[in-house]
Image (spheres, rainbow, N blue to C red):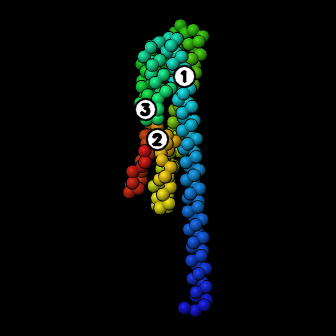
């Protein structure tokens, strides 16, 4: 092999290494940004869930039923393993008591009206926060399924905290006699891409 060919080969290999290094560095950086986005969206969702449960508990203490107060308290203290179940139970209790999506309750005291108003505002924010969180998780898991991320073992050693998993609750809002289901389906993985982490 001539000297010129050898130099060209070395330069070509060096360029490939640089390009590959730059690409893998970009993938790692994107993974870090998506993971931070998922963690931030979980923190926002967690805050909205607390803001929903707190006025629900207050309203139940003031107006009843006692069962709703217990569900709200359970949602406030539930660990992450039981959080979805506790929030689902609270949502069902709110609908059963007529508080979900209903702003026309009769004979409300000022304290009850304030609690109901806070509850309604928080319930709407829970729906938005949950959608944003699940979108963030979908993007993160989609990146992790791609071969560069699998080759680099991105996310393998950091575990899956609540910020890295879908949060699925029934946040149906009942208005009058109609119910509007706002539960978004989990994004499906592309065929052949493997199952999504959950």
Q: Residue furthest bottom?
A: 2
Along the line of sight, the residue nearer the viewer: 176 or 81:
81
Q: Residues within 10 Å of mark 3 (few under 14, many from 20)?
A: few
* Residue on which the image places disc 2: 166
Residue 59 appears in the picture as rendered: yes
134 over 117 or under it: above or below:
below
- Quarter of the figure that contains the N terminus: bottom right
- Which residue is the site of mark 3? 82
Disc 3 vs disc 1: which is toward the camera?
3
In percent of width and height, residue 108 lies at 55, 9
Question: Callout 1: few (<14), some (14-19), or many (20+) C-alpha neighbours within 10 Å?
Answer: many
The picture places residue 136, in percent across and down from the top left corner, at 53, 45
Q: Give the SS element for disc 1.
A: helix
The outermost residue toward the front is: 157
Q: Determine if residue 125 is in view.
A: no
Discs 3, 2 touching: Cβ within 8 Å: no
Residues under labels 1 and 2: Cα distance? 23 Å
Sequence order check: which comes first, mark 1 or mark 2? 1
- Image coords of residue 105 (percent x, y): 51, 13
Q: Please, is residue 18 above or below residue 71 in the view? A: below
Which quadrant, please, contains the C terminus? top left
Residue under label 1: 54
Q: Above or below — where is 20 with respect to 90? A: below
When asked about the image quadrant of residue 5, the answer is bottom right
Report the residue at 57% width, 64% height from top.
23
| Gap between marks 3 and 1 measured at Cα | 18 Å
Disc nearer the start of the sequence (3/1): 1
Mark 3–mark 2 Cα distance, whole angstroms, equals 14 Å
The residue drawn where x is 58% and y is 21% is: 118
Q: Mark 3 or mark 2, which has the lower sequence index?
A: 3
Please give the name of the residue rendered at 60% of the width and 10% of the height, measured from the top-left corner: 110
Q: Residues within 10 Å of mark 2 (few under 14, many from 20)?
A: many
């Amino acid at each position: 092999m001539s000297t010129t060919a050898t130099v060209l080969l070395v330069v070509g290999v060096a360029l490939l290494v640089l390009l590959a290094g730059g690409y893998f560095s970009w993938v790692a950086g994107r993974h870090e940004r998506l993971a931070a986005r998922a963690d931030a969206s979980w923190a926002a969702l967690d805050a909205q869930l607390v803001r929903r449960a707190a006025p629900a508990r207050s309203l139940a203490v003031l107006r009843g039923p006692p069962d709703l107060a217990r569900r709200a308290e359970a949602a406030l203290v539930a660990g992450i393993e039981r959080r979805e179940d506790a929030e689902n139970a609270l949502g069902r209790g709110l609908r059963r008591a007529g508080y979900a999506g209903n702003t026309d309750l009769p004979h409300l005291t000022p304290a009850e009206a304030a609690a109901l108003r806070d509850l309604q505002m928080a319930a709407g924010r829970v729906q938005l926060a949950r959608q944003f969180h699940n979108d963030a998780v979908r993007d993160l898991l989609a990146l992790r399924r791609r071969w560069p991320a699998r080759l680099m073992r991105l996310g393998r050693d950091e575990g899956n905290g609540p910020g890295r998993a879908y949060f699925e609750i029934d946040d149906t809002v009942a208005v009058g006699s109609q119910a509007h289901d706002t539960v978004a389906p989990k994004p499906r993985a592309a065929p052949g891409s493997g199952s999504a982490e959950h």
